[in-house]
Amino acid sequence: MLRNATKGVVRKGVTELAQYPKPGDKLHGFTLLRSKHVPELELTALHLQHDKTGADYLHVAREDKNNVFSIGFKTNPPDDTGVPHILEHTTLCGSENDRYPIRDPFFKMLPRTLSNFMNAFTASDHTFYPFATTNEQDFKNLMGVYLDATLHPLLKQSDFTQEGWRIGPENPKVALAGESAKPEDSKLVFKGVVYNEMKGQMSDAGYLYYIRFQDHIFPAINNSGGDPQKMTDLTYEQLKKFHAEHYHPSNAKVFTYGDMPLADHLVEVNAQLSAFEKIEGDFEIRRPVDLSGGPQNVTVAGPIDPLVPLDMQYKTSTSWLMGDTTNILENFSVGLLSNLLMDGYGSPLYRNLIEAGLGTEWSPNSGFDGSGRVGIFSIGLTGVKEADVPKVKETIHKTFQEAYENGFDQSKIEGYLHQLELGLKHKTAKFGMSLMQRIKPGWFEGVDPFEALAWNDTINAFQAELAKGGYLEGLLKKYLLNDDTLTFTMTPSATYADELVSEEATRLATKIEEVTKKLGGEAEARAQLEKRELELLEEQGKSNTQDLSCLPTVYVKDIPRQKDGATLRDSKVDKVNVQWREAPTNGLTYFRAVNTFENLPDELRELIPLFTDSIMRLGTPDMSMEQLEDLMKLKTGGVSAGYYSTPSPFDFKSSTEGMSFSGTALDRNVPDMFNILRMLVLETDFDSIETQSRIRQLLQGSADGAVNSIASSGHVFARTAAEANITDYGRLREQVGGLSQVKLVTSLASRPESEGLADVVEKLKAIQKFALSSSSTFRTAITCGSESVSENEAYLQKFLSTLPSSTPSSPKVPAPNLSRNSKTFFPLPYQVYYGALALPTVSYTSSAGAPLQILSQLLTHKHLHHEIREKGGAYGGGAYSKGINGIFGFYSYRDPNPQNTMSIMRNAGQWAVEKQWTPRDLEEAKLSVFQSVDAPESVSSEGMTRFLSGVTDEMLQTRREQLLDVTTEQVREVAQKYVVDALEKGEGKMVFLGEKKPWVDANWEVKELGMATAPAEPEILDEEDVKDAALGS
């Protein structure tokens, strides 16, 4: 039954303690240990224990319809093979019970639910499986599947080889092709979804630095994600043993959150847990390395970043061990101390390290990590010159000593406490998931979750200690004014990538030799490995034809046909249009504004991201950036500016662009918020003597690690680049946020200091002249409580009166021709590939938009996931439809088989046309779409679709009805017209990123990103040559 059907039933507020049992009472197989009401978070927490198995259970009751479930297990990794990570994947592949006797129930549930979140995560020493949904039946369905999948997984050997690792022909279709296969396709390589995911992760130098640092600061905890070099030592038997020992109720922690009845949850959880007897769980809490004996130094080799100058490739950090994190007050205080020392451009560590030119950006491990049992405080830099490496640690020591002697400004402390106050007041739609993520790490480390929830108790205790004087300085002296440290440095190695390839090739040859000896010859070994690949393909083939009726589902008929939008009101203040959303906001006002531009030249547009960074860095003639940052923390929840653009909902080929502005503040501080925003945009000093050096630091910080940011979301960059060749909107977004922006930033960052940046500064000043105005091009949206409207209107009018009333006109810029090349390749130093194929479709108001959206879900869940991930080994792949952008496309992520994927993408439209879609297929696709359409929305986001894109509630309602009414015939029609026919007309744009190999021939337009060191052409090895794959959870 839907939750809406229970409307009108009178029930007590879910946070009222009186309605719950008393500590010691029994309830559905559990004993309530304790309960606590936390008024500042508007929640009540209940801690229970399962009587039979000892499973730990935390329920957080709150008047929030977005309910959350998670089951987690302590999974201390025994080695670096990644067994917890591979188990996380294989656990979700099937159930040994008769309840869900199908392959891959987790992925098969994705289109049978209205959940707004479903996933699984492997942390350093625990693994957890969360979901969130607003639908009561959906919650019961998913909880049943999650509990069954984790406690009773099938763990078939074929799932281990698919998700973990195996050796097989590079192209999976070779097993079907037999002797007709091409030699390059039949080459034997290591394969496996997790194996390739971690190879992709290791391509990210930032991740590599962090994980190698963890190896040394926490030698007692092995790499839970898995090191590809060790992963191929893991056996199927070891995987099953690890599950039996760790995925047990006695080793579990269950979390539920929201407004659904606790008793209902306990009945289901008890039914599943009671099949087990109590065992000794693995609750060992492992601690970091002992540093009490004095300084330790570790140096390891790492890859060269091709987008960073060769003389700035070192990464170095120094770390201290802090206190026991079960001391909630001290843990909180050290976190605040960390912020005072390093947060913001005015912070002492930023000034003395980055502004002083010792490095370009914080190292990936920088800051206070309080997630383990012992806190770790690390400070480090990337983009360091070799000669400056020892100076980094010296400067950190010196800065700590100065901070101890000078003390901390009370106003800065109040600024951070003010941010906490705003955080508590801000109503987010994902509060439950955020709460679970915040509590979970400490809970597994023995930190009391009740104490972690008690915000006011902690703040009050902190202020009491602060009032005594010297509290934070005392913590600094206690933990940081010593040399009991670990200094960890990564040096650039020109041979690092080659050594990885060589090591994998040798390891592969050894493994093949083992199979050869076992079977008596090379031919027999190859035949066996190809036979196993064929068997896996057959097993994977069953996935798309099996009967899924055993899986629970919600139904499209449960989705309301009508959805009421937020009540909005329009007014004018002077010439400016204002959209009002009046709603309970806990005394907060949310401000948004857009200023649109016409005829903006490319040379200015591409610098808007640098402009928005600069106004948060340079300060004004009257106030330093440190003073402005302090004022922002004391008076606002943050202000920001950014590039803005949107296609027209009536014509996707036309678009509007400009700049957007936003701010949040307590109602009483709205005038201060407006004043800060005006100062930042209009008064930032671009003529200061320090301007060029500070802009150079911003550029170097952005360039440093750009390759890594692409590695973590390469499919997004590929899609952006493909769409840039189709629509004007796509071209604009690519300039400011795509690979051409990366190229611009890295080229400016590596410009010789002797050349200066005067030309760039002049362009930034030009942007400043038209960024903000009170003309008719300016519009605003304000969300606040009804009691604050009149005051906010007066504040807004005063703000507008201080702005320029007109913007300089620009000469009309001719629209550039979009690229006619259908295939573009960006060479990047990755072991895996990222790709996209994009096609133009229709505007948002077209009736074809709904079936295109449904088609994208059908292709993803019924075809592309199966072909690209399961068979091809990529971490991810699918189709997407961007309604307002007028784009339909395909993508793959961390993909070891790009050529195979390209063929799958090109043929997907024809597959959809020929497929005999069933009513169930259509039902599942519609459910998938409505997961996002009906996802909970925070009050601050209500009305923003209309304000930012022009899509009205009426348009949304029309699209809603069209989605609910889509037919299989409509799906085939749009697949034929907008995919098959469009590709035949040459309208598709393909983009791939990765290592340039011989298949990137003259038919591809190759675009270099201007690397400091061009990657060497790959060495073509024979059988032992190792390729890669891609992806994980």
Image (cartoon, helix red, strand yellow):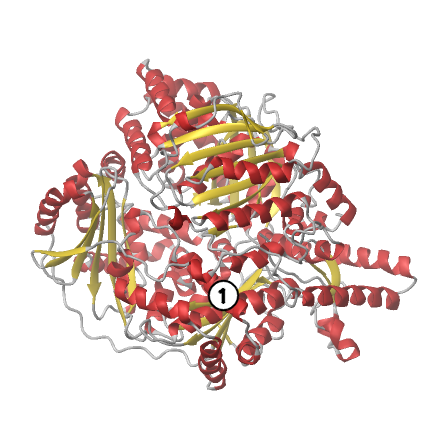
Left or right relative to 690: residue 574: left
Name the foreground residue: 816 vs 277: 277
Q: Residue furthest bottom?
A: 985
How many marks are shown on the rendered structure? 1
Q: Amino acid at mark 1?
A: Glu
One can see residue 773 in this view:
no
Q: Residue furthest front?
A: 9
Q: Residue furthest top?
A: 468
Task: Indicate whether 463 appears above or below 488.
Answer: above
- Residue sitting at x 32%, y 22%: 406
Numbered disc 1: secondary structure? helix
Task: Indicate whether 257 appears above or below 287.
Answer: below
One can see residue 253 in this view:
yes
Name the foreground residue: 460 vs 748: 460
Determine which quarter of the picture holds residue 750.
bottom left
Name the foreground residue: 637 vs 475: 637
- Residue sitting at x 54%, y 49%: 142
Task: Indicate whether 437 appears above or below 341.
Answer: below
Task: Indicate whether 954 appears above or below 57.
Answer: below
Residue 440 at what x, y percent from top left? 51, 35
Residue 621 at what x, y percent from top left? 18, 43
Instruction: Read off the residue under disc 1.
Output: 923
Residue 28 at what x, y percent from top left? 56, 32
Residue 110 at what x, y percent from top left? 53, 57
Q: Crowdedness of circle 1 by 10 Å Cα count: few (<14), some, many (20+)?
A: many
